[in-house]
């Protein structure tokens, strides 16, 4: 019976596995092969070399990588600090009002990221909505709040807010209320309950939310281009330039593989720290 169930499970999983191989693994393999091709080569049949990888350390692309990781880390930390109180309230306090907040957050995802960022661009730019209103009512304006690192981080926090909020809410919902009350009855302070009960028990949601936010922010491009005005150049910008204007596919592939390997390492480390059975709602026997 167990063998039959396993065969049925494998057959059921076969279509999605084939799709993953064709549309996920295969493109990664192509990128990986292109990354060891000679500079500005468009053929996969050329003799391989590693000049693109050596160029990364010579042309200053590590600085772009640094900015991508710093911006992703900063926005992820801010997202966690912002989302934890709201996620806690949605999971434990708001009850029916949680549905209204959920719908409001989800509806924002129905609008393209670029359109939403253009809205902030028109709002914060010199002569935009805020500056125009201030000038109209007070006679004083400002130079605009765009084109700096903080506004890029603001854009990342704004765009990826749902990807932190909902996993956190799910993680907090796993915390049994009896466990919290027992800790308070035993004399634990609010800080001790947070540190020793709520954060550890909500760890699956925390890891998923932080990984989603960090991975998406590390590969983000629109925020630095639209809101930051390329005040800093992120690695995604260098990848786009290599593939388009530079017509250097091997370099773009090498930069992509560098970012993929770093993010994959962080993701594997993060996932290894949580109980997948808990996330999937399964109990170990």
Image (cartoon, rainbow, N blue to C red):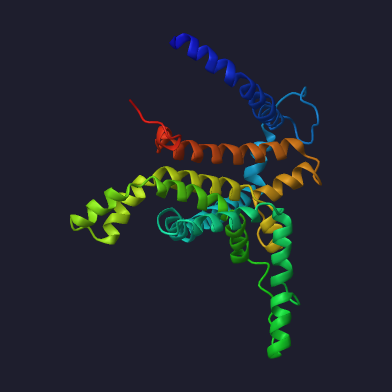
Q: Which quadrant would residue 225 be assigned to in this image?
A: bottom right
What residue is at 48 percent from the left and 61 percent from the top? 82
How far across and how far down the image is residue 52, in percent?
69, 37
Rendered residue at 28%/61% (across/down): 190
Residue 86 shown left or right of residue 131 in the figure: left
**Seen in the image, is 8 located left or right of residue 118?**
left
Residue at horizontal 64 percent and vertical 67 percent from the top: 148
> Which of the 4 quarters of the picture holds residue 204?
top left
The C terminus sits in image quarter: top left
Q: Position of residue 10 (x, y in %)?
A: 55, 16
Q: Is residue 15 left or right of residue 209?
A: right
Q: Quadrant of the N terminus?
A: top left
Q: Residue furthest bottom?
A: 139
- Say whether residue 186 is visible: yes
Residue 92 higher or lower than 271, as above or below: below
Between residues 47 and 150, which one lies in front from this camera angle? Answer: 150
Q: Residue furthest left?
A: 186
Image x and y of residue 192, in percent: 27, 57
Front in this rendered view, residue 112 or 67: 112
In the image shown, does 212 or 148 lie closer to the viewer? 212
Report the label total.
Answer: 0
Is any part of residue 49 visible from this angle? no
Spot occupied by residue 219 in the image (x, y as percentages of width and height): 63, 47
For the point 46% across and 9% down, the residue is 3
Q: Which residue is situated farthest in the front direction here?
A: 96
């Amino acid at each position: 019976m167990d063998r039959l169930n396993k065969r049925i499970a494998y057959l059921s999983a076969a279509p999605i596995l084939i799709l993953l191989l064709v549309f996920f693994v295969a493109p990664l393999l192509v990128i990986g092969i292109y990354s060891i091709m000679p500079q500005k080569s468009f053929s996969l049949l050329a003799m391989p070399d590693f000049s693109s990888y050596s160029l990364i350390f010579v042309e200053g692309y590590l600085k772009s990588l640094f900015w991508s990781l710093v911006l992703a880390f900063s926005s992820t930390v801010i997202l966690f600090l912002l989302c934890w109180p709201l996620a806690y309230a949605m999971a434990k306090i708001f009850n029916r009002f949680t549905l209204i907040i959920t719908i409001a957050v989800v509806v924002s995802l129905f609008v393209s990221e670029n359109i939403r960022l253009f809205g902030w661009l028109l709002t914060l730019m010199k002569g935009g909505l805020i500056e125009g209103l201030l000038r109209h009512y007070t006679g004083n304006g400002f130079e605009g709040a765009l084109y700096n690192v903080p506004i890029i981080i603001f854009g990342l926090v704004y765009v990826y807010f749902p990807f932190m909020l909902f996993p956190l809410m799910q993680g907090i919902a796993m915390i049994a209320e009896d466990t919290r009350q027992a800790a308070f009855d035993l004399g634990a302070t609010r800080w001790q309950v947070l540190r020793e009960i709520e954060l550890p028990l909500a760890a699956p949601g925390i890891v998923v939310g932080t990984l989603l936010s960090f991975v998406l922010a590390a590969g983000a491009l629109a925020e630095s281009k639209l809101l930051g005005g390329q005040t800093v150049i992120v690695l995604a910008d260098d990848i786009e330039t290599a593939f388009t204007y530079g017509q250097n596919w091997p370099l773009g592939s090498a930069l992509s593989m560098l970012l993929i390997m770093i993010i994959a390492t962080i993701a594997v480390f993060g996932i290894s720290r949580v109980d997948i059975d808990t996330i999937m709602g399964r109990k170990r026997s």
